[in-house]
Image (cartoon, rainbow, N blue to C red):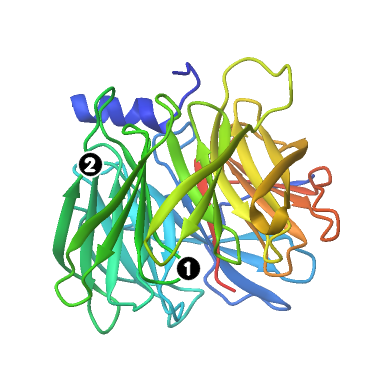
Amino acid sequence: MATTPNRRAFLTALGAMGATTALTGTSSARPAGHHRPVYLGSFSWTDPPGKGFQVVAHDTTSGALRPRSAIDGVPDASWLAFSPQRRVLYTTNELVPNGSVTALDLDDPWNPRILNTRSSEGAGPTHLSVHPTGRFLLTANYTDGTVAVHRLEGNGAIGESTDLVQHSATRRAPKAHQVITDPSGRWIITVDLGADAVHTYRLDTVTGKLRLNQRLSVQNGNGPRHVEFHPQGRYAYLVNELASTVTVLEWHATSGEFTVVSTLDTRPPGADGENVPAEIVVDHAGRFCYVTNRGDDTVAVFTIGARGARLRLSETVSTGGAWPRHCTLDAGQSWLYVSNQNSGTVTRLPRDRSTGRLGPVAESVEAPGAVVLALRS
């Protein structure tokens, strides 16, 4: 892998053992104007180190981000997920010994309050999500290649673990990288980078136990990382980190099974050098999707056709930062926000909602170790 500083190298060591705005504000006062709170997760091992978990003011008129407060006690928040009513926010604490997950109450969204922290039941928790019932928290432990299920209490606090599933692999160690619920709400889907596989499970909502339904193997060495569904729910797009590709999958919700449709590059022809894609996001209309390329430091823009069955790479655009790990669209779909881990910035790129194309960076916000940004609205 790369000589570029990255999370994977740090986890291995741990196991053996536009304008630029600084995100250093500490004010807890509610900002005036059309502002809503958004939440930033960052790593502590970067230089300079990130603050773990921060509140950021989002100007919903201009799209600008402005610094707010850091919340102590939430280290290495590498993924963020809301409860169905968006009253509680859950974070992974990825690089703490053995791994943990934290619940934060958003009764006052400008001043989140920690409800509790529990073991993630494995090392290197890199992704989590909340079941649509709001009764279970699902966590993917990258280092151990496991998926944990925790019951959630009535107030949103994390309860006891109800299940822990161990993935298996033949060529490399299993590395669980994502766990989500499908659009129908009937199936749990996990993506494992080390196993080169996508798993589908049935969750028993009484016992909190997972039962394997399908294991879809992709090409050896692809290193699948994240999957994102088309809004109509029939197709999904799988980002392959180690191959710099995205695979179109057809989803059969009745049987809970995927079939492979096609695979294409996230880079233009002739691109060379190290590159490892990270995040994928699909717009609300289901016409375009966006993939971050770490190494090329670009966002690949794909046009979606045939009601979700076909992708076409239409352009790649510089993120204005280094090692873009995460990206997300705002509620109005007019801006794409990119968390650039190694440059320690969050950049804002304008988006044409008709063509899906991205413009040059409009703003670059200083945010050491930035890895994920979650918009509440």
> Left of 147 or right of it: where is 238?
right
Q: Is residue 98 above or below residue 108?
A: above
* Residue 170 vs residue 354, the one in the foreground: 170
Please, what secondary structure does the residue beneath circle 2 have? loop
Which residue lies at the image location 80% right of the left edge and 53% below the top edge? 356
Q: Residue type at mark 2? A: His
Residue 233 visible in the current orientation: yes
> Left of 94 or right of it: where is 305?
right
Q: How many marks?
A: 2
Q: Label 1 to label 2, Cα distance in Å?
A: 23 Å
Residue 327 visible in the current orientation: no
Callout 2 crowding tier (Cα within 10 Å): few <14, some 14–19, many ≥20: some
Which residue lies at the image location 44% right of the left edge and 40% below the top edge? 225
* Residue 213 vs residue 113, the one in the foreground: 213
* Residue 228 vs residue 320, the one in the foreground: 228
Image quarter of residue 331: bottom right
Image quarter of residue 233: bottom right
Q: Are marks 1 and 2 in contact (CB under 8 Å)?
A: no
Q: Which mark is residue 47?
A: none
Q: Is residue 230 above or below residue 52?
A: below
Disc with the residue nearer the chain's start (1 vs 2): 2
Q: Give residue 109's position: percent from left, percent from top.
A: 49, 76
Q: Is residue 249 above or below residue 131?
A: above
> Left of 304 or right of it: where is 161?
left
Q: Give residue 376's position: percent from left, percent from top.
A: 55, 71
Callout 1 crowding tier (Cα within 10 Å): few <14, some 14–19, many ≥20: some
* Quarter of the rendering occupied by the N terminus: top left
In this figure, which residue is indicated by the disc labeled 2?
167
Please, what secondary structure does the residue beneath circle 1 have? loop
Q: Residue type at mark 1? A: Pro
Q: Which mark is residue 183?
A: 1
Q: Give residue 199's position: percent from left, percent from top.
A: 33, 49
